[in-house]
Amino acid sequence: MPVGRDGWFEAARPIRVEGGIKARSKRGSIGEQWWSRRFIDILERVCDPGRLSRGRAYARRGQVLDLDLGPGLAKARVQGSRPEPYDVSVRITAYGEREWAGLIEALAAQALHRAKLLAGEMPPEIEDVFAGCGLPLFPGERGLDMDCTCPDWGFPCKHLSAVLYLLAEAFDDDPFRVLAWRGMAREALLDALRRSGGEAGAATAGDAGPPGLLDVADVPFAERLGDFYEPGASAARLGPPPGPEGHPDLLLRALDPPKVKARHIPLLDLLRPAYRAFAAGENEEAEGSVS
């Protein structure tokens, strides 16, 4: 039996748990998306491999009873060999209002990053945006403050390791949890990006920059009777129609989402796949007519 920090002998096998949080991964590495793998790669580089291996086993057995993630803090209870579960905490620096104002400005200035975030995607380049602001997105070797009430020697212990792996899978499910851990909730970030979209990319002095997607002059109808049905811009200025590489759901990204849900799913999340499917069907028909 292994010896604990206070000198007593700890049982080798943990108490079996019913209803714990089990990792989806049954073998091999944990973490599927680039952001969760980035988090795991950091852990596996700085943490003891043996402890991480036992932590993966704990995560897959469902020994973690609960997991709560908030700004700067992840808390969990892990069932070990003692009757009472161990309390685990993992802290990182949550950025304040000033830091996030700079981050949002930098993200909104990149049209593609902004569009992907509004579509619920996490662009890999976001890590560079954070670094450019002098703020790391992922914690480094000294960026994690971890604690567990267990008596184990070694750091991190298997209980902490299990929680870290389940955090990675939680990030797989929703990449915005990475940002929420840093202090910015998903809806607050998206609302800020929508508000700053028209201001982002504003040009230097003397240059107002290109008009936004919905920047249309408001002219009374009585003054437009003669040319109401004429296009507002020439075909040359409009350019060619978007090809298959365009974003068929661009309009959904630009508009404020309606406060409507179906079966607890936001309406835009239901419409977006339909827009993409329609665009894919049109592209296939166009290619068939050309061939």
Image (cartoon, helix red, strand yellow):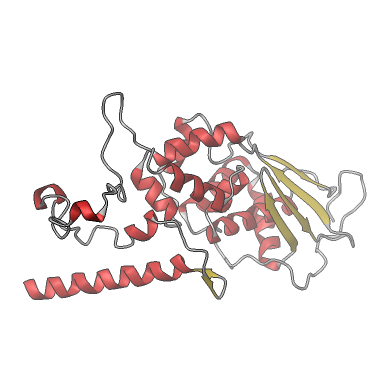
Residue occupying image coordinates x 32% and y 57%: 250
In the image, is residue 11 above or below residue 125? Answer: below
The reply to whether residue 156 is visible in this rendering is no
Which quadrant holds residue 221? bottom left
Q: Residue at x 84, y 59 (%)?
A: 85
Question: Which residue is at the front of the view, 38 or 132?
Answer: 132
The answer to which of 63 and 96 lies nearer the viewer is 96
Measured as percent of width and height from the top left, residue 278 is found at 28, 73
Residue that sits furthest to the front in the current view: 222
Closer to us: 66 or 133: 133
Image side of residue 253 versus residue 28, left or right: left
**Residue for point 90% across, 62% down:** 83
Instruction: Judge left or right: residue 252 versus residue 53.
Output: left
**Residue 203: quadrant of the picture:** top left
Residue sitting farthest toward the left? 291
Q: How many marks?
A: 0
Left or right for 173, reference 64: left
Residue 266 visible in rendering: yes
> Which residue, as the protein is rendered here, is positioned at the far top?
205
Quadrant of the frame with the N terminus: bottom right
- Residue 290 coordinates in the image, percent (x, y): 7, 71
Q: Quadrant of the C terminus?
A: bottom left
Percent across and percent down for residue 6 are 91, 44
Left or right position of 187 against 271: right
x and y percentages locating residue 125 in the rendered image: 40, 43
Picture quadrant where residue 81 is located = bottom right
